[in-house]
Amino acid sequence: MNFLKKLFKWLAIGIGLIILLLYIFDYSYILRGIKVVYFTGHKTAFIDDYPYFENDTIKKGSQTDSWPFHIDYNTVKETKKLEQVNKDWGTVAYLIIKNDSIWFEKYFDGFNESSKTNSFSMAKSITSAMLGKAIMDGYIENLDQPISDFYPQYEYAKTTVGDLSSMASGLNWVEHYTSPFSLTARANYDDDLAETMLEQKVVKTPGKAFEYLSGSTQLLGMIIQKATGKTLAKYLSESFWEPMGASDDALWQLDDDKNRLAKTFCCISSNARDFARFGKLYKDYGKWNGEQLLDSAFVAKSVTPRFKENPVYGYGWWLKEINNKNFFMMRGHLGQYVLVEPDDNIIVVRLGHRKSPDEGIGQFTEDISIYIEEAYKMLEK
C-alpha cells in the first residue's frame, strides 16, 4: 500500500514538473492539443472539432441560392469500388455536381447536407480568393505588393503577397503533422497565432520555387485582415458567403477569445454544398449569377501553374491531370476535397475522416484519383 502511495506521489510530481516545464518553455499549447485530440478519443485533428475552439461566424445572407437538382438526381448508385472506399476511409459527404446541378449526393455516419465539418487546408483556397477580392476592392495593390508594406519587420525580404498565395514565400516554416513540438501543431493549438507567425523568418529566395508551407497562408490572412481593417470572417461573409447565397452560416476557428485571429491555414467549418460554391465560382472565372465577384484574370492565374518545374500549384489551388483531364482542386487534411473539371462542367466534393494510407505532405494521394474515376464511371451509366 505504501509503495502505491509513493508511486502515485512521484507520478503526480513528475506530471506536475512536465506541465511546469511546458509553461516555462512556452509549449503549454501541447496541453490544449492533448485535451482536444486524445481526451476525445482521436489521434489527430478531426473533422468535427470546431466545438473545442473559439470561432467567428461567417454569416450567410438573407437569401439562399440553392443548388438545383439534376433531372437524373441520385438515379445512379455508387460503384462497388466507391462504396467500399467511402466505407473504408470514413466518407461523410460525397457529391457530384454536373452542369451546376447536383447529380448525386450521399451522406454517411449521421452527417447530412447541413452538417459542419472542418475544411482543413481547403481554407487556403478560400483565403487566396479573399486576396483576389482585396486586390479587386483596392485594399491590396496587386500580387507583387511586398509583405513589408504590411509588416515592416520583413523589410529585408523580397516576399510578395503573391508569393504567399503560391507557396513560394521562402519562410523557415517546417510543415509537420505528427510532432506535438511542430510549428503546425503550435499554430493549431496556441493562443497567440500572430506571435508565432511573426517569429518566422524569410530564409530562402522567395518567388523561385514551390514549397508547401501552411505558414505562408496564415501570414497572407493576417495581411488581408490588416489591409481591409475587417475580421476575416466578416470579409469572407460580405465578399463571398452572402453574394453566393450560402445555405448556412459557417464558422472560422480562432486562436483564442482574446486575440481572435482566424486560422487561415485551415479550419473553416461548413458543409459540402457550400464548399462546392468555390469550385463553381472558379470554374466560371469569378462570376456568380452575372456578378463578377472575382477578377477573371486573377482566377485564370490561380488555376494555372506558377512554376513549370513543379506544376502542381497555382495561387491557392492544386492542379493535377487525371486520365487526360485537367483538374484544379481544394484539398484538406484527412481527405477534404472540391475537385473541378471545368471543360466537363463537373465538380466532385468529398468530405470525411481519413484519406488513403499513402498520404504524405503535399503529395497527391490515391483517393483523389479514385473519387474522380468512380464519379466518371457513374456519369457514364
Image: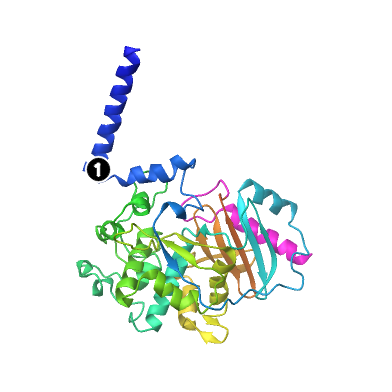
Quarter holding the C terminus? bottom right
Query: Looking at the picture, how far across and down is residue 158, in whole percent?
Result: 26, 70
Q: Is residue 181 visible?
A: no
Snapshot quadrant of residue 102 = bottom right
Residue 35 vs 241, above or below: the answer is above
Q: Is residue 138 magenta?
A: no
Residue 121 vs 40, above or below: the answer is below
Q: Which residue is at 40% across, 54% downward?
A: 53
Q: Does the magenta stretch include residue 377?
A: yes
Snapshot quadrant of residue 226 = bottom left
Quarter holding the N terminus? top left
Q: Say how the picture is coloured.
A: rainbow
Q: Which residue is at 38% across, 45% downward?
A: 33
Query: Looking at the picture, how far across and down is residue 129, in whole percent?
Result: 45, 73
Left or right, 37 with respect to 287, comes to: left
Q: Which residue is at 70% across, 52% downward?
A: 83
Q: Can residue 225 be seen in this view?
A: yes
Query: Looking at the picture, how far across and down is residue 39, in whole percent?
Result: 44, 40
Q: Which residue is at 64% across, 67% downward?
A: 324
Left or right, 259 with respect to 152, comes to: right
Residue indicated by mark 1: 23
Q: What amino acid does circle 1 point to?
A: Tyr
Q: Badge 1, how many Cα within 10 Å: few under 14, some, many 20+?
A: some
Depth order, front residue of 370/349: 349
Query: Looking at the picture, how far across and down is residue 163, in whole percent?
Result: 35, 69
Of helix, strand and loop, which one carries label 1? helix
Residue 265 vs 340, above or below: the answer is above
**What span is in magenta?**
356-381
Depth order, front residue of 157/66: 66
